[in-house]
Image: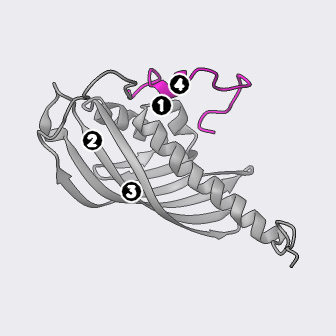
Amino acid sequence: MTTAPMGVGIGADELRRLVDRQQIVEVVFRYCRAVDRCDFDLLRTCYHPDGVDRHTGFTGDIDDYIDWLRTILARYAGTQHLIGQQFVEIDGDVARCESYGIATHWAGPDGDPQYDFTSGFRYIDRMERRCGEWRIAERLATRDWTRSDAGAFRPKEGDGPTGRPSREDPLYHLPGWPPSGNAEPGR
């Protein structure tokens, strides 16, 4: 029995769609990293300059969204956005991406427990490829449910790396990374 070489049967159109899909989902992943690390420069790379975000309590362009997020995220010791299934529909240079997720927000041991909550959400994004790069043109951050986690915060049991909502996070200080010294943010 012989097997065909890898890639045989995959046409250029199918390969392009796979690459496009991967680039689109990486925008969503980069967005989550940017919000959880409060890396607003990285966040800006997720949206086209005229992109619009529609969150609970906010609608506006990327500049106003970043200003709003700085204020909102200041009340938290941290957030964590986890992405589940993603459905991507591509039509040329425009795509619709629906990403299911869960976001946990916590105020920390000294914060106000009213800000401790977890929500189930969907990012419903219209992505556009401009100048060869996929970014968000419009986002509907749709909250499907929210659960209060007031008073549920628990500190770590011992020493070890601690995540931080800033460039002080261990992610930015991994020894030996980037190997070439010039890796692109979020890649």
Q: Is residue 169 above or below residue 51?
A: above
Q: CA distance from mark 1 to mark 2?
A: 16 Å
Say which amino acid is labelled 3. Gly
Give whichever of 44, 102 is nearer the camera.
102
Q: Position of residue 116 (x, y in %)?
A: 19, 41
Horizontally, residue 53 falls left or right of residue 175, namely left
Image quarter (top left, top right, bottom left or bottom right) of the N terminus: bottom right
Q: Which numbered disc, 1 or 2, marks the residue that appears first in the sequence?
A: 1
Say which amino acid is labelled 4. Tyr
Tell me the number on the disc at residue 101: 3
Q: CA distance from mark 3 to mark 1?
A: 20 Å
Say what secondary structure mark 2 lies in: strand
Q: Which numbered disc, 4 or 3, marks the residue that appears first in the sequence?
A: 3
Residue shown at 79%/70% (left/top)? 13
Labelled pair 3, 1 in contact (Cβ < 8 Å): no
The segment highlighted magenta reads 164-187
Q: Position of residue 138 (x, y in %)?
A: 50, 56
Crowdedness near tag 1: few (<14), some (14–19) or many (≥20) residues, C-alpha within 10 Å: some
Tell me the number on the disc at residue 39: 1
Q: Which residue is mark 4?
A: 172
Q: Which residue is mark 2?
A: 105
Q: Disc 1 or disc 4, which is closer to the eye?
A: 4
Say which amino acid is labelled 1. Asp
Residue shown at 48%/32% (left/top)? 40
Q: Is residue 175 magenta?
A: yes
Q: CA distance from mark 4 to mark 3?
A: 24 Å
Q: Is residue 131 above or below residue 140?
A: above
Residue shown at 42%/25% (left/top)? 166
Say what secondary structure mark 3 lies in: strand
Q: Disc 3 or disc 1, which is closer to the eye?
A: 3
Crowdedness near tag 3: few (<14), some (14–19) or many (≥20) residues, C-alpha within 10 Å: some
